Every structure is written in structure tokens, then in C-alpha cells.
Amino acid sequence: MRMHNADETCGIAQAALVLGDWWNVLVLREVARGHVRFDTLAAEIGLSRKVLTERLGRLVAHGVLRRALYQRRPVRYEYLLTDAGVALLPLLVAMQDWGDQWVLGDGTVTATATDDGAEHTRVHGLVGTRLPEGLELPATQHAGRADGIEPPTGQGAHLPVTAPDAAATVLFTYPGTGVDWGDPPIPGAVGCTLENRLFRDAWPDFRAAGVDVCGVSTQLVHEQQEFARAEAVPYPLLSDAAHQLTAALRLPTFRGAGRLSQKRLILIVDAERTVRHALFPVVDIPHAVAESLRLSKDCARETRNPTPPVR
């Protein structure tokens, strides 16, 4: 690619040189989603092996991806994000947010969604899929997870988004607590404190069922820590400020109060990290919390007492 001399000092031009084209962006999107092996990438993107090989080579050369050997005979590699690649995730999420609002939507800023929109289709399409392995986020201090494991606590400790030995996990995303959403407020943004209080009050019932609960927002850990302490939140709050979870699951977002925030949704995830149920959009918060308890208890019960195969 021929560049103007002025582009040598332009960060936008240099970033565009790395991203290259449509295919490079989609490769990064799929790697962020946990599709890190060549055949899976080719299938997900619909790209020829030759073109995919070229794109992966360029991204490795630019230091955005790295190759990791996972099989020796024959030699096979996984393609993983480097620190530079992880730093691109907010850019991918911002592109998705812009596309949802201005291309797939009507330009309105909202923290909710319609039942016939692209975001609704994308979230409910998560049902039956597995969360990427090894995905961890910075977490607040907490009283322990439903599986009985007491992981390291303290500001900045990282926890997996699903507890390793829990029978089921309720993973709920929320826009943010203690935020001024304007006057009038952004539709669907208000209610995060109420939602956390309802999950807090129902925590003994979740724990008794062997179900873990995790709240996720794009707020920083110290912001979540202050809220968790004030509200005596017993479950971990995870910070997705770097947008790793948002990029991995292509979660819907909106821009308000000076940051990109997640829209409110609830996922019920089983012990194998498979999404069993998705509640979105969440309009009636008390009903959604009660429904997540019911669905997660059923999921946990099935984990403990699996249906025997038909012979």
C-alpha cells in the first residue's frame, strides 16, 4: 500500500495499514470469539485457505496475532491475540456499536433493543454456543462463589466468567451503577442498582442450588468495588473495561455518559460453558431476576441428574 509522507506520523493511517481490509477485521473478530484454529476460522468467515493463510501471516507479522503450537504430528497452530491484538478489541467493539446504531438501527441511542432487531437476533443466537475457554476478567472482592471455591480476592484479581465447578452460572451485564444517564435518561439504562440488589437478595437461593452469579459492566474495578462494598454485593462483579467479553460474545452496547456500556442482558450458562438461555432485552428487571433463578435452578438440576441416553 502506497502511503503519503504525512501518513507516517498519522496513527489512523498506521492502524488502517495493520487492519488492512474487510478480511483482516473479520479474522480478528473471530479470534476474539475464541475461534483460533485455521479450519474453524475458514469455516466461520467463509474464506479460502490461500487468502486466510495470507491474512494470518500479515497479522502475525504486524504483531497482532501470535502462533501457538497445539499439535506436532502433523504440525498445527492456534492463532492467539497478542497484547497489541487485545488492545484492538475496543476498536472492534466501537465498530460494532456504530454499525448497530447507524447501519442496522436508526441512529437512536438506547440501552435496550427491539425483538426484531439485529442485536436481539445476535444475543439469542448465543444459545447453544460455548463461551471461549480461559476467558477471565478483573473482579471485585466477594464472599465466595457458588461452587464453594474461594478464589483470590482483592482489587485487580482475575476470575473466569463462569465458575469452574458451578452447576450453572448466571452471567448478567448491566450499563453501570452511579451513572448520570442524562435528562431524560437513555432508555433502558436506569435500574442497575435495583438489579444488583435483587440478585443480592436472591443470592442464598442461587447458592443453595449450586448456581454462581456474576455481574459484568464496562466500569473500572475500583468503581465496581465501591458499589459492591456499599451494597454488600456477595457475588463477584467483573470489569469488562477492555471489552474482552463484549468482543468474544458480540454483546450489544451503547455510548452514553462518556463511555461505551453494555446493554442489560442475562445469560444462563451450564457447567460445560454452553449458553442455555438468553434473556434480552431485559425490560422488567424483577421478572428477569426471578426467571433467571428458575432457569438456572433447572439447568443445575439437569447437570446433577443428566438424562440417560436412549438405547
Image (spheres, grey):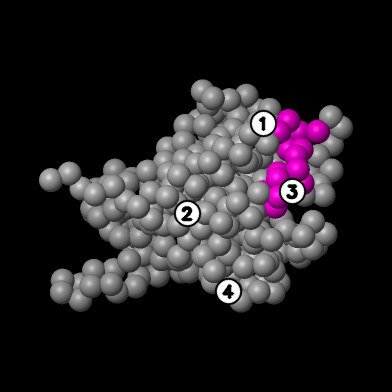
Q: How far apart are marks 2 and 4 (CA)?
A: 17 Å
Q: Is residue 4 left or right of residue 234?
A: left
Residue 11 location (% of width, % of height)? 62, 59
Residue at 69%, 61% (x, y): give it: 234
Q: How far apart are marks 3 and 4 (CA)?
A: 23 Å
The mark that comes first in sequence, 1 or 3, is 3
Residue 195 visible, this angle: yes
Location of the C terminus by quadrant is: top left
Residue at 30%, 60% (x, y): give it: 37
Q: How far apart are marks 2 and 3 (CA)?
A: 20 Å
The mark that comes first in sequence, 2 or 4, is 4
Q: What residue type is labelled 2?
A: Ala
Residue 245 visible, this angle: no
Q: Name the residue under label 1.
A: 284
Q: Mark 3 points at which residue?
A: 197
Q: Do the residues labelled 2 and 4 touch (CB within 8 Å)?
A: no
Q: Mark 2 points at which residue?
A: 168
Q: Do the residues labelled 1 and 4 touch (CB within 8 Å)?
A: no
Residue at 60%, 51% (x, y): give it: 205
Residue 287 location (% of width, % of height)? 63, 34
Q: How far apart are marks 1 and 3 (CA)?
A: 14 Å
Q: Which amino acid does label 3 sit on?
A: Arg
Q: What residue type is labelled 4?
A: Pro
- The magenta segment is 185-201
Determine crowd level at label 1: few under 14, some 14-19, many 20+ residues with C-alpha closer than 10 A: few
